[in-house]
Amino acid sequence: MKNIFKCFIIFIFTSQIIPADFENLQLLEFDSKKDLKNYMKTLNTALGVKCSYCHDMDDKALDSPHKEITREMIILTRTINRHLLSLKDEDEKDTVELVTCWTCHKGNTKVEYNKPEDD
């Protein structure tokens, strides 16, 4: 019984630190399942959705229209952030507020297009 428990603990520990065999990650690079899950949780929060919004829960690697849009949005935010960082001096780069999904979505799948009122 102790050996089974030991093997289980080793399996759990190694599955968190050894890079997983991720399927169909076209733009994302993660070293662990934990990092990938944390990133996906930020997307869930930013868009106000559950995993099933983009994923077939029986096979999460399958492509869907929402996954394609998400990939395009990831490319967009990376491009904007690269541009923002290029405008700053090396010592100012830590002060740049980077664009994330939350910047525009704020917990909704649809972006609010109304211009904020002037103060």
Image (spheres, helix red, strand yellow):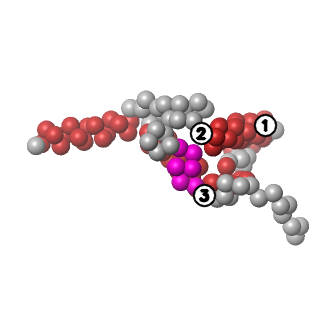
Q: Is residue 17 left or right of residue 41?
A: left
The amino acid pointed to by label 3 is Gly
Q: Position of residue 33 (x, y in %)?
A: 44, 39
- The residue tagged 2 is 64
Q: Position of residue 93 (x, y in %)?
A: 72, 41
| Residue 54 rendering spot, x and y as whole percentages | 57, 45
How many callouts does the rendering have? 3
The disc, 2 or 1, on the residue closer to the chain's N-terminal end is 2
Taking the view exactly as shown, the residue that stands out farthest to the left is 1
Of circles 3 and 2, the one toward us is 2
Q: Amino acid at mark 1?
A: His
- Quarter holding the N terminus? top left
Indicate whether 106 appears above or below 9: below
Disc 3/disc 2 C-alpha distance (Å):
18 Å
Q: Earlier in the sequence, mark 3 or mark 2?
A: 3
Rate crowding at label 3 as few (under 14), some (14 to 19) or many (20 or more) other CA atoms within 10 Å: some
Q: Is residue 7 left or right of residue 37?
A: left
Q: Which residue is mark 1?
A: 83
- Give the spatial CA distance, label 2 vs label 1: 29 Å
Q: Residue 90: in sight, yes or no? A: no
Q: Name the residue that disc number 3 marks.
A: 48
Q: Which residues are magenta?
A: 48-55
Out of 55 and 88, give the one closest to the viewer: 55
